[in-house]
Amino acid sequence: MVELVLVSLFTIFLTWSSIINMKRIREFEEIRDRDLNLERNYFVSIIVPMRNEERNAKRCIGSLINQDYPNYEIIAVDDMSTDGTLHILEEFSSKHPNLSVVIGSPTPQGWVGKNHALWQGVQRARGDWLLFVDADTYSESYVLRAALSYAEEHKADMLSIFPFQELGSFWESVIQPIIFASIAIAFPHQRINSLRYKDAAANGQFILIRRDAYRAVGGHESIKDKIVEDFALAKLIKSNGYRLRVARGGNLIKTRMYTNLKEIWEGWTKNIFLGMDKDWRRLILGIIMLSLRGFLPFFLIIQSLLDISSATCGPIQIVILLEGLWLVFLNIYLFWEGTKIYSILPYYALLFPVSVAAFIGIMVSSTYKVVSGEGVVWKGRRYDGAK
């Protein structure tokens, strides 16, 4: 009887939390294209850090030079690339006068490479607004108009947009949706956008920030050693009384972060535990909840079927079996909703135990690399004592 009560309470809790979390995700505000009605014709400096981005450089820069906003510059920072990135950038800059290329200097001691690249770009920037864009993004021609209009409408000092995530391979489709959903649940946009809460988060793929606010908080120099620099900058901005805003912008900007399992594992391993502020309680709770969601339903079903096939079968076993089946259905439904958001095939919803297992593995790996002192690796650089 105690077992039935515990399982029933957990089933009710998981159903309730699923409804709440889906509501949060669905209500995440989407920026739409709109007319740009500003008091001033702001000058915007777009800064793009690039390290070995030969695969993405043409698509990213090509989309940025075609903005229909009249008053902007692009500063591409080549961060010590060893491939053809610099050559591609120089070809673009020879044809487009609003694009300048900064040949980055070696990363100083105590700096994270991306932070130093962005800092170098800022030193060349002339804009009233600074826009930090990752090299793996593709922007629509109206992204500047829409983002500036939204920032002005909401009186934001810093706006971070979450792009549409392009998922092209099996492992991208299995792993990426559960990680994005978990981030959205752990950092509700309603709390981030509210001045009443201290919650702060951002997506480094697109950060638009007023230059005066950026300068006032010390910019990337103040967070030079932070690997999860987007969250660090968001916390810096909000803790100093500036207005932070996050929104979805799938119709404005797209990105493909990783293309295979190795890239996914390495990319998220550097972020997950640090993104939790090395909070062991949050880590352990996350692993427990993921395990219960992903694996407990199958345990309940198997145990109930074994009991039913034996002489110990009774109403309790039947109820537990039904609850296990309900939890499996609930998971499939939630993951199916995710397949619609990311435009992937519906059958990926059936693989939710694999998604959960992979995510837990990344969380454990991320924690181990930070706690053990092994450090994290990104873009060929190792960061010991990661922060």
Image (cartoon, grey):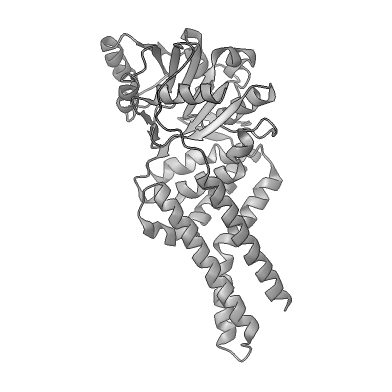
Q: Residue at x 44, y 14 (%)?
A: 45
Question: Residue at 63% across / 87% down in the picture?
Answer: 314
Of residue 86 and residue 75, the one placed in the foreground of this image is 75
Task: Give whichever of 144, 328 is nearer the camera.
Answer: 144
Report the number of numbered marks: 0
For residue 129, side relative to residue 94 (left or right): right
Query: Percent position (x, y) of residue 378?
Result: 49, 32
Q: Residue at x 49, y 16 (%)?
A: 130
Q: Can you tell which quarter of the image residue 317 is in?
A: bottom right
What x and y, as percent, mark residue 264?
45, 42
Determine whether 318 is above or below 27 in the image.
below
Horizontal side of 310 relative to 161 (left or right) equals right
Which quarter of the rendering shows the N terminus? Answer: bottom right
Q: Can residue 307 be seen in this view?
A: yes
As displayed, is residue 192 above or below residue 324?
above
Considering depth in this image, is 171 or 149 the residue closer to the camera? Answer: 149
